[in-house]
């Protein structure tokens, strides 16, 4: 049986991040991808030119359609735009009997806001407690906890601060630090450092979405959190290495890197 994975996220018209990155990742990793669209962005390699949220009833209806009939083995959340959507999605995933990977998306690679500042309290009080794994980058860690990470050493303190909001596991993504691409996965007792060489490639649009969807895909296959995260890190590292130019700005990672040469 092919496991079902659901992404609850925004659409990136440029195809490198958001729902599009999530579904491509799921295809590449051999699971059946499904989507609940929360917002539509007009977006390309240069930035986000516009964003429109869907009504909360439209988000709830998509979620119920998928979960009540088809069923899900894992859920991933990305761009949720507003406090109202964060709270609605948090309630939906808390009521679903499947692991949830929460990527608390704040801003795009170009610095465009994908979450209202007024939604941060709801992220802390409703979304993070419903997460099996939360995957903040360093800017999101600073916004959520106030902890600023400038070195690998400080990642442990940041992880503890995020765990204080109730996710089972946290993966602190150190992709924005200089040096190796180092992430820290912990549940407060076990600690796993994931280290990969930094690829000197500016075409990294979609790294965060890709990593979170790959984790959800592994969990849906029945892997443990540390196993799913290790496999996802290997997949995203290959995708960054193969990232390619598109448009005039930052191009996407290559979700199909494992197929190249075979098709
Ligand atoms: N240049 C790079 N080379 C190798 N790995 C990288 C590079 N940049 C980021 N990564 C890895 O990609 C994953 C995503 O991390 P990152 O910090 O870029 O997420 P993000 O900022 O949420 O991404 P996004 O821009 O999609 O929101 C992490 O595992 C990180 O270590
Ligand atoms: C829709 C969307 N979700 C997430 C990201 C993450 O950077 C993005 N750029 N766009």
Image (cartoon, helix red, strand yellow):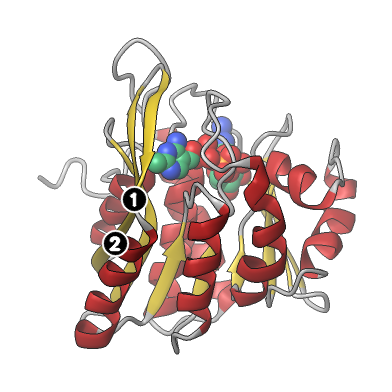
The percent coordinates of residue 3 (x first, y second) are: 27, 79
The percent coordinates of residue 165 (x first, y second) are: 77, 69
Looking at the rendered image, the quarter that the N terminus falls into is bottom left
Toward which corner of the image does residue 150 lie, by quadrant?
top right
The percent coordinates of residue 224 (x first, y second) are: 54, 81
Looking at the rendered image, the quarter that the C terminus falls into is top left
Toward which corner of the image does residue 7 lie, by quadrant?
bottom left
Which residue is located at x 14 percent, y 47 percent?
Answer: 262
Provide the secondary structure element on which disc 1 rests.
Answer: loop
Depth check: give the residue in front, 177 or 161: 161
Q: Is residue 49 left or right of residue 152?
A: left
The circle on residue 54 is: 1
State how far apart marks 1 and 2 are (Cα).
6 Å
Q: Which residue is mark 2?
A: 58
Vertically, is 86 above or below 132?
above
Mark 1 crowdedness (10 Å alpha carbons): few <14, some 14-19, many ≥20:
some
Vertically, is 69 above or below 127?
below
Q: Is residue 75 left or right of residue 58?
A: right
The circle on residue 261 is: none
> Are the residues at dot 1 and dot 2 in contact (C-beta closer than 8 Å)?
yes
Q: Residue furthest left?
A: 263
Q: Does the beta carbon at disc 2 come under 8 Å from ligand 2?
A: no
Which residue is located at x 51 percent, y 39 percent?
Answer: 114
């Amino acid at each position: 049986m092919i496991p079902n994975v659901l992404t609850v996220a925004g659409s990136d018209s440029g195809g490198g991040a958001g729902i599009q990155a999530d579904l491509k990742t799921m295809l590449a990793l051999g699971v059946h991808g499904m989507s609940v669209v929360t917002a539509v962005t007009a977006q390309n390699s240069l930035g986000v030119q516009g964003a429109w949220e869907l009504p909360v009833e439209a988000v709830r209806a998509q979620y119920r359609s998928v979960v009540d009939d088809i069923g899900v083995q894992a859920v991933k959340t990305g761009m949720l735009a507003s406090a109202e959507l964060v709270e609605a999605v948090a309630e939906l995933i808390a009521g679903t009997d499947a692991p949830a990977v929460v990527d608390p998306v704040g801003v795009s690679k170009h610095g465009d806001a994908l979450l209202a500042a007024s939604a941060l309290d709801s992220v802390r009080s409703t979304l993070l407690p419903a997460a099996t794994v939360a995957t903040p980058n360093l800017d999101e860690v600073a916004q959520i906890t106030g902890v600023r990470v400038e070195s690998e050493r400080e990642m442990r303190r940041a992880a503890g601060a995020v765990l204080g909001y109730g996710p089972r596991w946290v993966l602190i993504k150190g992709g924005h630090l200089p040096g190796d691409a180092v992430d820290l996965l912990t549940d407060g007792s076990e600690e796993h450092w994931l280290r990969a060489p930094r690829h000197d490639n500016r075409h990294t649009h979609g790294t965060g979405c890709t990593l979170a969807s790959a984790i959800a895909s592994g969990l849906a296959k029945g892997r443990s959190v540390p196993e799913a995260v290790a496999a996802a890190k290997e997949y995203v590292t290959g995708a960054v290495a193969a990232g390619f130019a598109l448009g005039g700005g930052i191009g996407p990672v290559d979700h199909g890197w494992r197929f190249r040469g075979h098709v």
